[in-house]
Amino acid sequence: MTVPVLSAAQVSRLFGPIQVLFDVDFDLYPGEVHALIGENGAGKSTLMKILGGYLQPSKGTLRLDGEDVVFPSLREAEAAGVIMIHQEFNLAMQLSVEENIFLGREIKRGPFLDKPAMQAEARRLLGRLDCPVDPKMRAADISVPNRQMVEIAKALGRNARVLIMDEPTAVLTNRETDILLEQIDRLRAQGTAILYTSHKLDEVRRIADRVTVLRDGHLVRQAGAGELTEHQMAEAMVGRELSDLFPDKTRPADEVVLEVSSLDVPGHVEDASFTLRRGEVLGFAGLVGAGRTELMEGVVGLREAQGSVKVNGRPLKPGSVQAAREAGLVYLTEDRKEKGLLLGHNLRENLTLLALDRFTRIAIDSRKEEAALTHAFEEFDIRAGDREMNAGSLSGGNQQKLLLAKTMLAEPDIVIIDEPTRGIDIGTKRQIYDFIARLTEAGKSVIVVSSELPEVIGLASRVVVMSSGRIAGELEGDEIGEDAILRLAMGLQDARDMQERAEREAQPS
């Protein structure tokens, strides 16, 4: 392994007057997994896009097999065997899975498409990932994790020499992640060079041979993965000592601010009942597909639902997001890119959208909007090179901060946050956790829906666990732990078992 298959030498990149990469050296050898880590905005995506032919370096050189090379576009990069899997899905949603996998390189029999051959090959590629999706289904009709698997299947079908993977497991379950990492091991054994970026540092240690750390566009650390602990990786990313990740939990009051009784969301959730107290962080855990998101969408009126929802003792009009908002109940979607933000609009327009009436008399008061944006930058530490940039140009962490600022501008009392830190670096995670703690200290109430068990355990004083569309049980205080949550989520223990155990433990010996 003396010659890298692909390398960047002294690569810099400017966007207008703003420099985002500074003289970065990076190389990829055949048969290795090289992890690229850093906080959101550190320059990881920019470097990956330069290596993958999506961007040109402002300065510096790319080399392929030791020879200088220029990729004028991604087509030239892909022709050289350099394939990039984006964090944001690059699928044509109205096309089938099979059509997406072979888009631009369709199999033909004479002048006609060979549909049976493409379907068979699509099934084979998806089978390598243990993904049961029917290739004839539309991409729009499959789950978010399965869309990621389709993106990976596309790359596998192109026989990549270099595979660039941007947060490939951000939306995958633990089981799906294990399958993907096994596939990466196979590709490594076949000689594929893999650039792997992830905010899940345990995953980086598990799969990577080497680690490069970027901070503020500079390369600050490079070492063998076995030479760095997760804590050392995190410290290199943020440039400072990291204390405990989770803030102290606020003790909730006895007052119930949200009461959900026997709520059904057709096709997704049956007979769900729970309460939320003032000043409480209530966690919702469960496996992907358990119905957590659908339940929350039913509560706030985004989905049709039958049952009772009361806010501060008053019934909430069903199916009305406006009624929920007026009652002080808001929901931050897990899908900030498709549902949470208008990516093609500027930061100010996104920020004030939910509370536009506060900025409008005869016309929109742009000065007032600008003042609100300045306050949001300071309050939520939103980092943007240009106030007029579109929301889609922000890093993932800054998009999440903008979504939080947008939601809080409506001055809610109850905040439901779905997957608050998906695809976000550890430094930004700590900021969001601190923000949640400040909310509860101010008497607000928060529901956190998360697939990351440490996050649920670290934030919540009470955890509701869902399984197959039903509430399987509730844990509080010392009961909260990974084993107890997983047993409920997998249907190995139901709510009645938990209650009987609690009653037995409460009896005097």
Image (tube, rainbow, N blue to C red):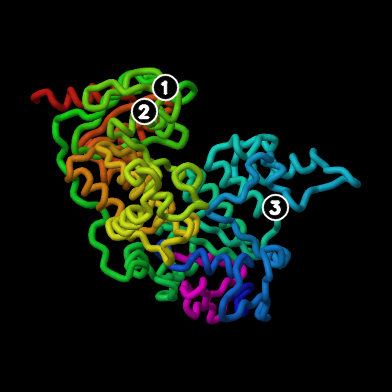
**Is residue 37 rendered to the left or right of residue 509?**
right
Q: Secondary structure at mark 2?
A: helix
Query: With respect to residue 319, does 92 lie above or below?
Result: below
Q: Residue at x 28, y 69 (%)?
A: 240
Q: Is residue 430 visible?
A: no
Question: Which label lies toward us, 1 or 3?
Answer: 1
In the image, 71 versus 353, the foreground residue is 353
- How many residues crowd around disc 2 within 10 Å: few (fewer than 14), some, or many (20 or more)? many
Give the residue number, with chain letter if any, for mark 2: 299
Q: Amino acid at mark 2?
A: Val
Please identify the quadrant where the C terminus is shown. top left
| Mark found first going from the N terminus, 1 or 3 | 3
Q: Are marks 1 and 2 in contact (CB under 8 Å)?
A: yes
In the image, 167 versus 416, the foreground residue is 416
Q: Residue at x 48, y 46 (%)?
A: 171
Rendering coords of residue 90 (x, y %): 61, 51
Rendering coords of residue 133 (x, y %): 62, 37
Q: Main structural element of the magenta stretch: helix, strand or loop?
A: strand
Rendering coords of residue 433 (x, y %): 28, 51
Q: Could you say which quadrant of the image residue 71 lies in?
A: bottom right
Q: Amino acid at mark 3?
A: Gly
- Whether residue 469 appears in magenta in the rendering, the answer is no
What's drawn in magenta, residue-wise?
Answer: 8-37
Give the residue number, with chain letter if any, for mark 1: 305
Q: Residue at x 32, y 67 (%)?
A: 235
**Is residue 170 rendered to the left or right of residue 418?**
right
Q: Secondary structure at mark 3?
A: loop
Query: Alpha carbon of mark 1 to alpha carbon of mark 2: how far?
Result: 8 Å
**What number of labels is visible?**
3
